[in-house]
């Protein structure tokens, strides 16, 4: 990596190296990364506190790996997630507690996936996750500045002066870098004039967040997601664990009211479930619009977009939050390298080049998942007339031919609920890449093929160091590149040599990486392979 003169020195009024706007999971992870990389950081959020209602809930393996590298208590975080036994399936039902039309496994959450990652996917709702990440920040002496709204920023000789509103008062924060993690309606993105490409209204939903003991209706068929196929209550019930917490997503159109009375909300919920004496407590209602959009640019000078400020996906795949965590992981080590003088400005240009490509592929897969869901509803005989749909559904469920078509349509949703290839197998195109990216396909999405091709995440393998079993990912420090050499590598510089510093009981170097003993890998701080040495 080229060495450069340090770009920034703190000006007389500089209050922080980095200002992060937005304290969702992406912004919080960015602040944790900045601290670990030796950069001062302030993080502000217009909300009064952490997320109160469920939102994203899929935390995939790669996100946990990133938090593990930062040094978070990943086991503690995972203990708050739903278990695979409770959140390991997706069901299509007439209504919850009635006929089960079909079932698919939900992602690869079992111990067999420990061959691929040290931290398999879990379901942990965002409103439970954010306090855990905030607590990790507080342990490091950093407090989120809530009820603080970003208004604008101006360039200075040393970086930026950002104007912040707290209550009726305005104040300023001086920073060298500005990172927008402020969500889909990003004020920072709007202020720097970056537009979004793609459809901004694919489907509207009414969201009912409620609490109810539905164990009797779930019975022997626990799951994370129940697709309600009854024409009069069609939608999705999402289990958010905890104290019997649920969200019912009900499609809406231009004729639907923006809000309902509490009684109307509960009536809608009851139409989606079998008759029950269980009490239903409505916690909140909201509306949500499904989109598929990417920012035209991820960067303007030293202002960067990450997470939902840069991309918005359909929820069909659970890629939004996780793609954002990948964004901030890719970005922060590069900012640190430039800020601290170990890299040239050109390194920053690779952020958009690498991450926007990943977002494009994730958006494509998520959108295809959403459209493919219509195949199931078509097989069930959906019709604009709900009475006709109800008759068609009743007929389909007693017809062998229709049941076979329904089964085929449901089985074709496998890519929607098994995206391990996109989760840990994504690859950046770098100057050392030897092959082009493959065209996105079901196989690429649903299967992970470990590879030492430059641009890939270093494949996981179990190694032993000083008598302790570790992941190969643990060999990579956040603050620098690392050279990992085979047992016979004779290069001048080697940080870790196989069979010397670590032992390889499963022959990971040869069988997984398909490398020779005299070869070596250079791995970037974000755990992606930069190049291979002979």
Image: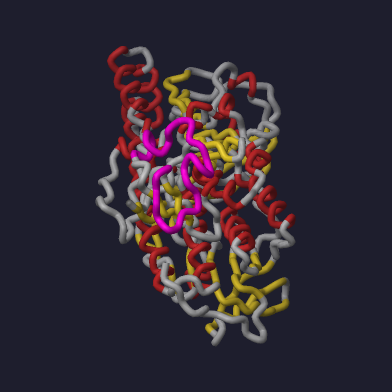
Across and down, in percent, residue 46 comes to 64, 64
Q: Main secondary structure of the magenta part?
A: loop
Name above or below for residue 416 compared with residue 319: above
Colour mode of the rendering: secondary structure
Number of on-image labels: 0
Q: Residue at x 54, y 62 (%)?
A: 181
Q: Residue at x 40, y 31 (%)?
A: 386
Across and down, in percent, residue 90 comes to 48, 28
Please tell me whether residue 444 belongs to the stretch shown in magenta.
no
Q: Tell me: 264 left or right of 366.
A: right
Please tell me whether residue 512 belongs to the stretch shown in magenta.
yes
Across and down, in percent, residue 365 comes to 35, 44
Task: In this rendered view, identify the residue nearer to me: 30 or 429.
Answer: 429
Place residue 488 in its image quadrant: top left
Name above or below for residue 327 compared with residue 52: below
Q: Tell me: 335 left or right of 133.
A: left
Q: Residue at x 54, y 87 (%)?
A: 157
Is residue 448 visible in the rendered image? The answer is no
Across and down, in percent, residue 378 comes to 32, 30
Q: Tell me: 81 left or right of 428.
A: right
Residue bounds of the magenta highlight: 487-514
Which quadrant holds the N terminus?
A: bottom left
Task: In this rendered view, identify the residue nearer to me: 524 or 175.
Answer: 524
Task: In this rendered view, identify the residue nearer to me: 260 or 455.
Answer: 455
Place residue 275 in its image quadrant: top right
Task: In this rendered view, identify the residue nearer to me: 490 or 123.
Answer: 490
Place residue 156 in its image quadrant: bottom right
Is residue 393 visible in the rendered image? The answer is yes
């Amino acid at each position: 990596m080229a060495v450069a003169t340090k770009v920034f020195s703190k000006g007389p009024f500089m209050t922080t190296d980095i200002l992060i706007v937005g304290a969702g999971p992406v912004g919080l992870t960015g602040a944790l990364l900045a601290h670990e990389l030796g950069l001062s950081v302030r993080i502000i959020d217009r909300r009064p506190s952490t997320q109160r209602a469920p939102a994203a809930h899929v935390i995939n393996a790669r996100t946990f790996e990133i938090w593990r590298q930062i040094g978070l208590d990943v086991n503690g975080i995972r203990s708050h997630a739903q278990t695979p036994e409770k959140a390991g399936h997706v069901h299509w039902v007439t209504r919850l507690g009635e006929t089960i039309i079909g079932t698919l496994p939900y992602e690869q959450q079992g111990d067999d996936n420990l061959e691929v990652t040290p931290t398999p996917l879990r379901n942990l709702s965002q409103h439970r996750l954010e306090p855990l990440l905030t607590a990790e920040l507080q342990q490091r002496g950093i407090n989120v500045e809530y009820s603080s709204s970003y208004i604008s920023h101006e360039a200075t000789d040393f970086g930026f002066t950002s104007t912040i509103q707290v209550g009726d008062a305005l104040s300023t924060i001086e920073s060298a870098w500005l990172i927008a993690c402020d969500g889909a309606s990003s004020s920072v993105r709007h202020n720097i004039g970056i537009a979004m490409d793609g459809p901004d209204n694919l489907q509207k939903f009414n969201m009912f967040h409620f609490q109810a003991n539905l164990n009797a209706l779930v019975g022997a068929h626990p799951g994370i997601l129940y697709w309600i196929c009854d024409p009069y209550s069609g939608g999705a019930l999402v289990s958010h664990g905890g104290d019997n917490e649920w969200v019912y997503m009900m499609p809406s159109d231009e004729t639907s009211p923006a809000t309902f009375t509490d009684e109307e909300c509960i009536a809608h919920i009851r139409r989606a479930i079998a008759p029950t004496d269980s009490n239903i407590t409505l916690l909140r209602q909201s509306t949500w619009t499904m989109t598929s959009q990417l920012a035209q640019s991820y960067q303007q000078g030293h202002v960067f977009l990450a997470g939902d400020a840069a991309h918005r996906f359909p929820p069909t795949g659970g890629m939004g939050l996780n793609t954002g965590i990948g964004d901030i992981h890719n970005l922060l080590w590069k900012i640190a390298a430039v800020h601290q003088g170990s890299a040239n400005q050109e390194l920053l240009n690779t952020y958009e080049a690498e991450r926007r490509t990943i977002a494009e592929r994730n958006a494509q897969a998520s959108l295809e998942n959403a459209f493919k869901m219509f195949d199931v509803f078509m097989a069930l005989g959906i019709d604009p007339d709900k009475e006709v749909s109800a008759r068609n559904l009743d007929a389909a469920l007693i017809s062998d031919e229709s049941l076979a078509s329904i089964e085929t349509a449901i089985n074709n949703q496998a890519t929607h609920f098994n995206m391990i290839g996109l989760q840990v197998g994504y690859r950046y195109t770098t100057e050392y890449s030897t092959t082009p990216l493959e065209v996105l396909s079901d196989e690429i999405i649903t299967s992970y093929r470990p590879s030492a091709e430059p641009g890939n995440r270093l494949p996981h393998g179990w190694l032993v160091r000083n008598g302790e079993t570790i992941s190969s990912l643990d060999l990579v420090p956040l603050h620098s590149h690392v050279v990992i050499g085979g047992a016979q590598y004779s290069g001048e510089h080697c940080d870790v040599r196989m069979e010397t510093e670590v032992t390889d009981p499963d022959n990971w170097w040869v069988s997984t990486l398909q490398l020779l003993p005299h070869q070596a890998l250079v791995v970037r701080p974000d755990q992606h392979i930069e190049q291979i040495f002979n």
